[in-house]
Image (cartoon, rainbow, N blue to C red):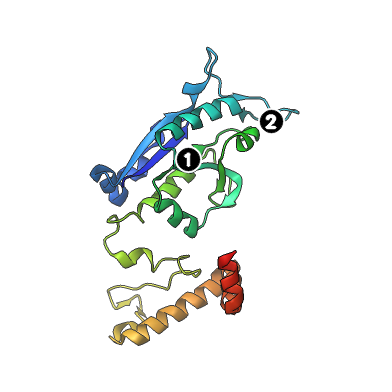
Amino acid sequence: MTFHATILTLYPEMFPGPLGVSLAGRALEEGTWALETVQIRDFATDKHRTVDDTPAGGGAGMVLKADVLAAAIDHARATNPQAPVLAMTPRGKPITQARIRELAAGPGVIILCGRFEGFDERIFAGRAVEEVSLSDIVLSGGEPAALAILDACIRLLPGVMGAASSGVEESFETGLLEYPHYTRPVEWEGRTIPEVLRSGDHAKIAAWRKQGALDDTRLRRPDLWERHCDVRDQPASDARRKIED
């Protein structure tokens, strides 16, 4: 099954962009995933093809119109009715690796890219749209965030990455940051690869890597560490109940 990505944007020329090269580009050429860009302005109904208007109640900037957005979303859904619709907005829920895996396992995704001051809020009541944030930053538009989310999905599609384990031993996959990596030369500017990694003892290497992931997560991402500790300390009965709920 081909993963089908539909991008609703005012700047379709931004795609595939970096997704047209390297692993994602090769997978696009091979038909592992497909890309369609939809110009939001095509669904404006006035002669000026207006997609935005001033904010109700006053204020700076412009807001994307609900009627135009709804028409674009309806068009995209007619092509891929099972695909979820994501709206890129800093007001959305931060995307997680777990959600990326869910998206990659499905038929594809429809991504709505915001511009200006954002979306008329009524679009979220009138259509099933998932508000998603890439991070606690504000971009000029949703296109760069859409590229990042698509890249994260595409690399998980079957056959895209060379080693099947590559996607499993990544940061966030187990709730921790990934362990540190080294490669040749053995010594560089007086710094050497840890001896355990040169020992050939796979059990010791695995233990070293696990400890490295724990230490780096605790020091660099206390938020992830806290969640990891909460899950680890949760009684088995509570964990089962949470899954069942």
Residue 78 falls left or right of residue 234: left
The amino acid beneath tag 1 is Ile
Q: Count residues near mark 1 (Cα–Cα under 10 Å), then give few for <14, some for 14-19, many for 20+.
A: many
Estimate the x, y position of residue 6 in percent, counting from the top left: 41, 37
Number of the label disc, if any, that sits on residue 60: 2
Q: Residue at x 65, y 33 (%)?
A: 122
Nearer to us: label 1 or label 2:
1
Q: Is residue 243 visible?
A: yes
Q: Is residue 91 above or below residue 53?
A: below
Residue 125 quadrant: top right
Front in this rendered view, residue 18 or 188:
18
Q: Which residue is mark 1?
A: 111
Q: Earlier in the sequence, mark 1 or mark 2?
A: 2
Estimate the x, y position of residue 80 in percent, counting from the top left: 41, 37
Q: Is residue 230 visible?
A: no
Mark 1 touches mark 2? (CB < 8 Å): no
The amino acid beneath tag 2 is Ala
Q: CA distance from mark 1 to mark 2?
A: 26 Å
- Residue most extreme to the left: 30
Front in this rendered view, residue 233 or 189:
233
